[in-house]
Amino acid sequence: MSSTDPHRIFNFGAGPAVLPEPVLEQARQDLMALPGVGMSVLEVSHRSAVFEGILEQAEADLRALVGLADDHHVLFLQGGASQQFSMVPMNLLGADRVADYVLTGAWAKKAAVEAAKFGQVHIAATTEAEAFARVPAVDELRLHPDSVYLHVTSNNTIVGTQWPMLPDVTGRPLVVDASSDLLSRPIEAVRCGLVYAGAQKNLGPAGLTLVIIRKDLAAQGSEDLPATLRYAVAAEHGSRYNTPPVFAIYLFGLVMRWLIDTGGLSAIETRNRRKAKRLYEVIDGSGFYRGTAQPESRSMMNVTFRLPTEELEQRFSTESAAAGLSGLTGHRLVGGHRASIYNAFPEAGVTALVDFMSEFERTHG
Ligand code: PMP
């Protein structure tokens, strides 16, 4: 479906990213006054029954979408995924404990650097020597016998790789940075001790960090930790130890309703696969574009590719932007191009990019 608003362009940005139009419409309607409340969600107390209802409904809808059992907490936090790089080891590690990290990109490396400030980090696998063009196979993982968790990044936003399936490791919890693919496909939350994501790609606006954590793990953090950095404190206070990002939680709730109305996680996965396949087909069918991720590790969320020369890449960036296709320049660390096609990115935008790429190749190839 094309946009109902003629001013909107196709936003391929990696995050903050495109939101579903029905969500934006609803937010616009509610902005002056929530029905029956007489004020907007920006203005209500986070302790009010109104906001409590919004938060509880958002959590219930998330639980229904994921199929989440009562043995996990859902926490609405702040500080971005980057703060989770620190909170995870602060709560679960300790100077005399070891955690396994898999290095699959710049974000995974940052997570490991933070963890090393609070405990011992063992690198279970790394694909850095291959410019992170793939994620490791499960049998390449070398886990430390005493590690207390295994940290992986499910989707590597910058290089455009994704674990086809999360590794199945027994004996220790899996901790997943799912910032750029959470809720883009069904997740086996039961297998995960902790899943975290900044909301600004697939879940809502910036300012909210979602954490799904097994209750026994949340209980582990020491009482000496700062209160705002302890999972147990957030859990005890229903994510309202202090003022939470109320508007972001409300918008997250609207995104959950949109996902349910769209048919849930299997339906969105089918759509995401279809969108990504169309772009990879253009790349594979041309001698002009070159995909940077290994095919078996390709991301459904961030499609990365290069052109024959940097000069052509500059032209591609300029001309695509002029054609109303925004945000196609790759991350500054790797260059090239990246099309981020998260859940809310419309299929019409993929069609527009496919057409643009074919025409660009025809005229510049
Ligand atoms: N992890 C991944 C996989 C990301 O893509 C990002 C942001 N692009 C981050 C972590 C950092 O997120 P934040 O900006 O919310 O701290």
Image (spheres, rainbow, N blue to C red):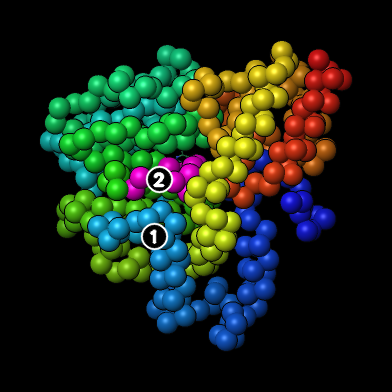
Which label number is shown at residue 187?
2
**Residue 263, image quadrant:** bottom right
**Is 42 placed above or below 308 here?**
below
Residue identified by numbered label 1: 63
**Residue 363, image quadrant:** top right
User: What residue is at 31 percent from the left and 41 percent from the top?
Assistant: 175
Q: In the image, what residue type sits under mark 1?
A: Arg
User: For numbered disc 2, what is the local secondary structure?
Assistant: loop
Position of residue 93 measured from the top left corner of the image (x, y, whole percent): 20, 41
User: What span is in magenta?
Assistant: 178-189
Image-based side of 20 in relation to 152, left or right: right
User: What residue is at 76 percent from the left and 19 percent from the top?
Assistant: 312
Residue 40 lies within the magenta run: no
Q: In the image, what residue type sits under mark 2?
A: Ile
| CA separation in Å, label 2 and label 1 | 11 Å
User: What residue is at 25 percent from the left and 67 percent from the top?
Assistant: 236
Residue 179 lies within the magenta run: yes
Mark 2 surroundings within 10 Å by alpha-carbon count, few (fewer than 14), some (14 through 19), many (20 or more): some
**Is 13 placed above or below 74 here?**
above
Q: Main secondary structure of the magenta part?
A: loop
